[in-house]
Amino acid sequence: MFRSPYADVPPVDLPIHDAVLGAAARFGELPALIDGTDGTALTYEQVDRFHRRVAAALAESGVRKGDVLALHSPNTVAFPLAFYAATRAGATVTTVHPLATAEEFARQLGDCSARWIVTVSPLLDTARRAAELAGGVREILVCDSAPGHRSLVDMLASTAPEPEVDVDPAQDVAVLPYSSGTTGTPKGVMLTHRQIATNLDQLRSAISAGPGERILAVLPFFHIYGLTALMNAPLRQGATVVVLPRFDLETFLAAVEQHRITALYVAPPIVLALAKHPAVSRYDLSSLRYVLSAAAPLDAGLAEACAKRLDLPPVGQAYGMTELSPGTHVVPLDAMREAPAGTVGRLIAGTEMRIVALDDPGRDLGVGEAGEILIRGPQVMKGYLGRPDATADMIDADGWLHTGDVGRVDADGWLFVVDRVKELIKYKGFQVAPAELEALLLTHPAIADAAVVGVYHDDGNEVPHAYVVRRPTAPDLSEGEVAMFVAERVAPYKRVREVTFVEEVPRAASGKILRRVLRERA
C-alpha cells in the first residue's frame, strides 16, 4: 500500500458554499471574478452578497433541500453565483455540458429528476427542448437575460429571507456531474459537500493560490477539474479568477498578457498550442509562474517543450477522476523542477493507493511494477445515482475505488500512468464512452455491427474511431454517412472522427469486444 507523504487532513464538515466563501468577508474588496472578454468584475464581498440574494429568490420560488438544479452554461462570472446560490438553497447541482444535444440533456434531466434549469440565452432553445422531452422541470432561469425567463440579475432584487437549510455535509450531495466511469453510458456521480470540500484541503498541502494570484479559467466549470481547480480552490483562498467562456488561442493569450495571469490549469491540447503555435511569441506571458495539466495524459516531451518556450519550471501534472472529487495526485509546486518527466504527481494528503496485478486483482504490486491503480480516501464518491450495481463494480467492499487506469510508482512515490484498462476515450479531456456510440451506431438500418475505440493522432489527441460492419443490403454505405449519422445525434466532442469498414468486429467467446485488437490495428 502506498500512502501520502503529507499529514492527514480532518474532514471538512461544511456546506460547499461556506467552505469556499467562508472567508469572503476577509477578502472583501479584492477581485474574485473578472470576465476576461468584457472586464466585468465582482469583488469577494459582491460574490458573497449576490449568491445569498439569489439563494433567497430560489427558496422563495420553491427550491427545497433535495431538489436538483441543472446548471447548463459555459464559463461566466455568473456560474459560481448560480452554483453557490443553489447549494445554499439546499439543492444539488447537476452540471451539464453546454454542447449537449437536447436529447442528451433530457436524459440527464430525467435520470436525476431535475426540477430547475439555469442556462444562458444562446442555449435556451436546447434547454427548452430538453425540459419538454424530460418533463418535470418547473422553471428555466437564465444567467443573462431573455424574454419570458427570470434572470439571476432580476433575482438579486429579492427581499425574501435568506434560506437556512440544515445541510448534512457527510450525506447530502452537493454536485452531481455525469461520468461514464470505466465504461458504459454516463452516470450521475454523487459527490457530497464533505467530499469536495475535503478534497480542497487535501490539495492545498501541495498546490495553492492566494491573494495576489490570478488564475485563468478557460477549462469548463461544468467539468469537475474546472469546478475544483478554477472555481472552488482559488475562490476559497482569495485568488482572482479571470473567466473565459471557451478556448480561443488569441483570446487566451491576450487574457494572460492583459490580466497578468500567474498560473494556468489546462489540458494537453492547450499545452500543445503553447509549445508550438507561432502566435504565442506575439504576447507577453512573463507573469506566468507555472503551468499544470490534467484531464488527459500529457506527453513528457511536449511538457518539456512548453516549459522551455515559456521559460518556466517543467509543466506539472495532476491525476484524478470525477468519482474522486476529483484529485488524488499532483506535482507539488515546490517540486516541479525535481519531479521526473512524465509523472502525474505524488499522493495528496489523506489518500492511499494500491497497484494491483491486472491478471489477479487480489495481488498487490510493488515499486516499479505496472498494474491497475486503486484509490481510497475521503474524496471517494458516495456512489452512482440510482445504480448500486455500477457503484459496487467501481468501489469494492473495503472502500477501494478501481480507477481502470494502469500505473507504476517509483521509489520516491511518483506515479506514472502508462495505460488504461477502462474503455473510456478522452477527447481533449472530455469523456467519450464507446458503448454509447456503439449503441447509437447499431440503430442505423445499414449497420450490422460496430465497435468504437480511441486512437491517438500526432497532435496527442485521442479520437473516437469506429469499426463498422455493413449489412449485406447496404454495400454502398460510406464513411461520411456513418460520421454524419453520429454527428447529428451527439455533442460535438463525441463525434466519430474516423470510420473503418470491416468484415466482423473481433470479440471474445463471451461476446466482449476485443478493443485492444482494434487499437493495435489502428
Image (cartoon, helix red, strand yellow):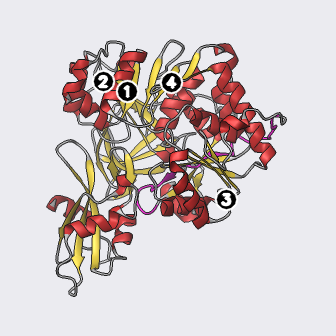
Query: Which mark sits nearer the N-terminus, 1 or 4?
Result: 4
Could you tell whether 67 is left or right of 276 in the image? right
- State the image coordinates of residue 475 (x, y, percent, origin top left): 17, 82
Residue 141 visible in the snapshot: yes
Residue 219, picture quadrant: top left
Residue 194, picture quadrant: top right
Residue located beneath label 4 in the image = 241
Give the Cα distance between marks 2 and 1. Answer: 7 Å
Give the Cα distance between marks 3 and 1. Answer: 43 Å
Residue 234 lies, with reference to residue 486, above or below; the image says: above
Query: Which mark sits nearer the N-terminus, 2 or 4?
Result: 4
Residue 410 visible in the snapshot: no
Element on which disc 1 rests:
loop
- Label 3 crowd bin: few (<14), some (14–19), many (20+), radius 10 Å: many
Labels 2, 4: front one: 4
Residue located beneath label 2 in the image = 339
Residue shown at 36% from the left, 28% from the top = 252
- State the image coordinates of residue 482 (x, y, percent, origin top left): 26, 69
Element on which disc 3 rests:
loop
Residue located beneath label 1 in the image = 331
Labels 4, 3: front one: 3
Give the Cα distance between marks 1 and 4. Answer: 22 Å
Q: Is residue 175 rendered magenta in the image? A: yes
Look at label 2 and name its amino acid: Ala
Contact check, label 2 and label 1, Cβ < 8 Å: yes
Look at label 1 and name its amino acid: Val
Residue 42, picture quadrant: top right
Between 157 and 71, the one nearer to me in the picture: 157
Labels 1, 4: front one: 4
Element on which disc 2 rests:
loop
